[in-house]
Image (tube, helix red, strand yellow):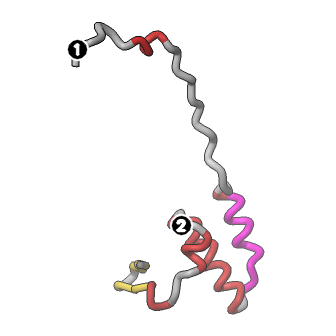
Amino acid sequence: MGLLQSNPCEAIERPKTVPSPPRGMSADAIKQLLAVIPDTPTGLRDHAIILTLTFTGRRRAEVMNLKAKDIVRDGTQVFYA
């Protein structure tokens, strides 16, 4: 509207933001976790859950609510809805 010649807030120093380091497990920690899962049906399920959480970045509730009908295999690729 042209009422002010300059912005009076220009002199205010803005706070510096420091990005927080990413939280989560390292690749080695995930390998160690997967190594201790037994080769039982329950262990295979847990293995799939951990890999899905790791590779998709989905929330825990989203992964736990997945049903078999949500997963589609197209050749060697797997998709989910």
Nearest to the observer: residue 24 or residue 34: 24
Quarter of the view holding residue 49: bottom right
Residue at image location 73% in from the left, 68% down from the top = 33
Residue 11 in picture, x, y percent from top left: 47, 10
User: What number of labels is visible?
Assistant: 2
Badge 2 element = loop
Label at residue 52: none
Which of the two labelled residues, at mark 1 and mark 2, occupies the earlier sequence position?
1
Q: Is residue 60 above or below residue 11?
A: below
Mark 2 is surrounded, within 10 Å at the Cα level, by few (under 14), some (14 to 19) or many (20 or more) other residues, namely few
Marks 1 and 2 sit apart, C-alpha to C-alpha, by: 48 Å
Mark 1 or 2: in front is 1
Q: Quadrant of residue 37?
A: bottom right
Q: Amino acid at mark 1?
A: Gly
Q: Which residues are magenta?
A: 28-39
Q: Percent position (x, y) of residue 71?
A: 44, 85
Residue at the (26%, 12%) spot, across then down = 3
> Looking at this view, is 1 or 13 the one in front?
1
Residue furthest top as drawn: 5
Q: Of helix, strand and loop, which mostly describes the magenta segment?
A: helix
Residue that mark 1 sits on: 2
Could you say where residue 13 lies in the image, as x and y percent from the top left? 52, 15
* Residue on which disc 2 sits: 58
Q: Residue at x 72, y 90 (%)?
A: 40
